[in-house]
Amino acid sequence: MTELDQRYAALLTGGDAEGMAFYRALADAELFILLEAEAEGDVMTPRVFDLEAGPVLLAFDSEERLAGFSDQVLPYAALPGRVVAGQMVGQGPESENRLALGLNLGSGAASEVILPPEALDWLMAMLDQAPAEVLEARVAAFQAPSVPGAVLATLAGALAGVARAYVVGVQYQGGRRAQMLVLTGVEAAAEAKVLRAVTEALAFSGLDASALDTVFRPVGDALLARLAGVALVLEGEAVVEGGPEVPVGPGMDPARPPYLK
């Protein structure tokens, strides 16, 4: 079984967390899509099948499953799932007969499913959430964070290239309260990539990315001394400092991924 098989099987018997995990795996997966003809440079035309449910673009999560679809050699392209979904969503919601994504159709795989356009819209909304504006200069006080352990565990997996991460509650001048993520040791050229990974991890954990203000600081920065004894500290894929899990605060209920069957 592939990872998508496992994630989809878990989705069918699980809840929101399993749904999030499936969509994240789909975004990260390399998908093999059928084309009308061999691609010419960057120009490619996906082959569309008119099914009873509407027009469908076929994609497979392995070359073997693609090859099993037909006895003939078929033109195809290998693209990340997020790219495929992005191109399909780019049709615009006003388009008639919007494409659905047929995943592993005809293969007998556990992840054989048709993803409707609405599911792809939801996926891209999760991937495209922009980080919140950082108001570090206006912090009045740091406080113990209010982020659930499940979110911290997901976040830890997105810290490649980060020396250490600090999660802390903040109260800004004017009274606004939020959570802050301070990332240290990230090279300037890699900040955008790290921020994208963190934003996606937050989206798929069920926490709105706008609920966590993210800043970058060098190792040894003076700000870090102010966080001692208050912040949770993430290093690698484990929480190495901090207290027990804090209940989810108001407005942090998990986003619900589309239900598939």
Image (tube, grey):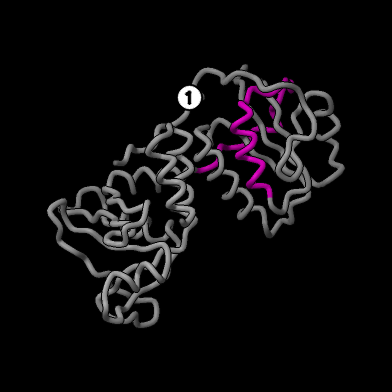
| Residue 186 visible in the picture | yes
The magenta stretch spans residue 158: yes
Q: Quadrant of residue 246?
A: top right
- Tally of marks: 1
Please say whether residue 172 is visible from this viewpoint. no
Residue 242 x %, y %: 77, 26
Q: Looking at the picture, how far across and down is residue 254, in whole percent?
A: 47, 29
In the rendered image, the vertical position of residue 76 relative to residue 153, given as above or below: below
Residue at the image position 27 percent from the left and 78 percent from the top? 71
Vertical placement of 192 versus 223: above or below? below
Q: Nearer the viewer, residue 46 or 43?
A: 46
Q: Quadrant where the C terminus lies? A: top left
Question: In the image, residue 12 lies at what x, y percent?
Answer: 37, 38
Q: Is residue 22 magenta?
A: no
Question: From the viewer's perspective, is 8 left or right of 145?
Answer: left
Q: Quadrant of residue 236?
A: top right
Residue 250 position in % (x across, y down): 52, 18
Per the rendered image, the range of residues in magenta is 130-159
- Disc 1: which residue: 253
The local secondary structure at tag 1 comes to loop
At x 35%, y 69%, the residue is: 66
* Residue drawn at x 52%, y 32% as measured from the top left: 207
In the rendered view, tell whether residue 74 sits above or below residue 139.
below
